[in-house]
Image (cartoon, rainbow, N blue to C red):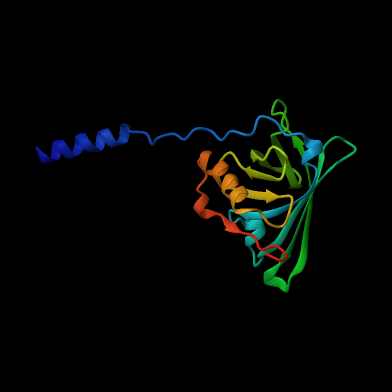
């Protein structure tokens, strides 16, 4: 009887599917003209290109410019704290995904490889933004200034948490004077 019960439980367990999370949603629209310029990284999920291979990025900024071909130029800068604060610069480009109202971008720093850059939170006056990926494995909190008020930071983190991101993984990015 125990054997039959155990087999029945195993069979039921095999049929059960884990609960599905809702897909990540972006903001309704991003005005690229207002989004262009420099953003300071306030916090991020650790990732291999900023925190791997002996690199530890601090004082990170991302600058977006409009290119003549209509795409967005992307310049990421940081000081590598693991290499005597040597500046590291990555130049890339991005294009808006059709039908996303500029809220979903595809970014490349090394063609032909592209990554998803989805704006999932955006303060109405473009003071801060939250950028993530549909798989919830990348997350950045960006600000127009090197620091954010506690209320703005809480709102940005709340936007990510509402999308199912594990915000306990966020690590602050040291910025000048912070």
Where is residue 20, by image quadrant? top left
Question: Foreground: 53 or 81?
Answer: 81
Quarter of the image with the N terminus is top left
Residue furthest to the left = 1
At horizontal 20% and vertical 34% (from top left) the residue drawn is 8
Q: Is residue 19 left or right of residue 118?
A: left
Indicate the position of residue 90 as horizontal and vertical percent values. Answer: 77, 55
Indicate the position of residue 98 as horizontal and vertical percent values. Answer: 72, 27
Where is residue 48, by image quadrant? bottom right
134 relative to 147, above or below: above
Question: Foreground: 103 or 40?
Answer: 40
Indicate the position of residue 118 as horizontal and vertical percent values. Answer: 65, 39
Indicate the position of residue 47 as horizontal and vertical percent values. Answer: 61, 55
Residue furthest to the bottom = 84
Quarter of the image with the C terminus is bottom right
Q: Could you tell me how many numbered marks the image carries?
A: 0
At horizontal 70% and vertical 62% (from top left) the residue drawn is 175
Residue 30 visible in the displayed image: yes
Question: Foreground: 126 or 55?
Answer: 126
Q: Is residue 75 left or right of residue 103?
A: right
Residue furthest to the right = 68
Q: Is residue 34 left or right of residue 24?
A: right
Q: Is residue 156 left or right of residue 147?
A: left
128 relative to 13, above or below: below
Residue 139 visible in the displayed image: no
Where is residue 55, by image quadrant? bottom right
């Amino acid at each position: 009887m125990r054997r039959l019960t155990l087999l029945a439980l195993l069979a039921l367990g095999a049929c059960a599917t884990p609960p599905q999370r809702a897909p990540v949603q972006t903001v309704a629209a991003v005005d690229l003209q207002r989004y262009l310029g420099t953003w300071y990284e306030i916090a991020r999920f650790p990732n291999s290109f900023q925190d791997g291979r002996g690199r530890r990025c601090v004082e990170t900024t991302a600058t977006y410019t409009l290119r003549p071909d209509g795409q967005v130029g992307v310049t990421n800068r940081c000081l590598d704290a693991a290499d005597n604060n040597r500046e590291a610069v990555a130049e890339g480009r991005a294009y808006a995904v059709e039908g996303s109202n500029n809220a979903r971008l595809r970014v490349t720093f090394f063609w032909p490889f592209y990554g998803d850059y989805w704006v999932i939170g955006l303060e109405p006056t473009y003071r801060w933004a939250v950028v993530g990926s549909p798989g919830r494995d990348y997350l950045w909190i960006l600000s127009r200034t090197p620091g954010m008020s506690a209320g703005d930071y809480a709102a940005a983190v709340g936007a990510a948490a509402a999308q199912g991101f594990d915000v306990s993984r966020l690590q602050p990015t040291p910025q000048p004077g912070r």
